[in-house]
Amino acid sequence: MAELVRFSVSLPRELASRFDQETIGRGFASRSEAVRDVMEHFLTEREWSTDETEVIGTVVIVYDHHDAELGRRLTRTQHKRPGSVVCMTHVHLDERWCMEVIVLRGRALDLREIADHLVGARGVRHGKLVCASLTDPEKAPA
Ligand code: NI
């Protein structure tokens, strides 16, 4: 068996409680097992996105439009790689929150970098990149 490490994590009680409710007793034997599973998923998702595979993807972000600096940063990030941005849609959710859906196309590692800049910006409440490979599986080497 692989060597195990223990570490402690600080997080809001409400988040821990929601996580436990969604995992323990629903196929996960313990919180440790659930966290291991989440970490594996996270790493798998990131590993494939560090190569030069041609992919199409969307980044969805929900952010506070009162933060002017954030708006400028989001625009700047997209202008830095105009060839990767196919199109975007902006939805005004309410007086405070906006959602932006940005369609990207290019190398997986470039899309990951753009998405990290967008999702990681202060003031972004939710953000996620979803990608699909454009490589034809029938033409890919075995
Ligand atoms: Ni808006």
Image (cartoon, rainbow, N blue to C red):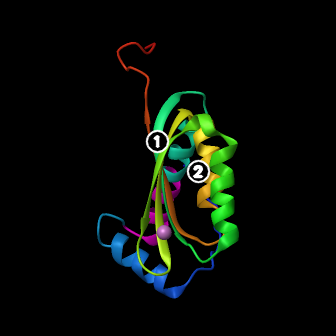
Which residue is labeled 1 in the image?
57
The quarter of the picture where residue 101 lies is bottom left
Q: Is residue 75 left or right of residue 35?
A: right
- For the question of whether residue 134 can be seen, the reply is yes
Provide residue 117's location: percent of width, then percent of height: 66, 54
- How dense is the environment of label 2, judged by Cα within 10 Å: few (below 14), some, or many (20 and up)? many
Residue 113: percent from left, percent from top: 65, 45
User: Which residue is drawn at the image coordinates 58% and 50% (left, top)?
Assistant: 115
Q: Nearest the camera: 73 or 131?
A: 73
Quadrant for the C terminus, please: top left
Q: Dot 1 lies on which element?
A: strand
Please say if 66 is above or below 118: below
- Residue at mark 2: 115
CA neighbours of label 1 inside 10 A, class few (<14), some (14 to 19), many (20+): many
Residue 56 lies in the magenta stretch: no
Main SS of residues in magenta: helix
Q: Residue at x 46, y 81 (%)?
A: 95
* Residue type for callout 1: Gly
Can you give x and y, in whole percent of width and height, for residue 55 in the image?
Answer: 49, 32
Name the amino acid type tagged 2.
Answer: Ala
Q: Residue furthest bottom?
A: 13
Q: Please tell me in which quadrant of the rendered image residue 68 appears.
A: bottom right
Q: Are marks 2 and 1 in contact (CB under 8 Å)?
A: yes
Magenta extent: 29-40
Q: Nearer the viewer, residue 29 or 48?
A: 48
Q: Is residue 121 above or below residue 42?
A: below
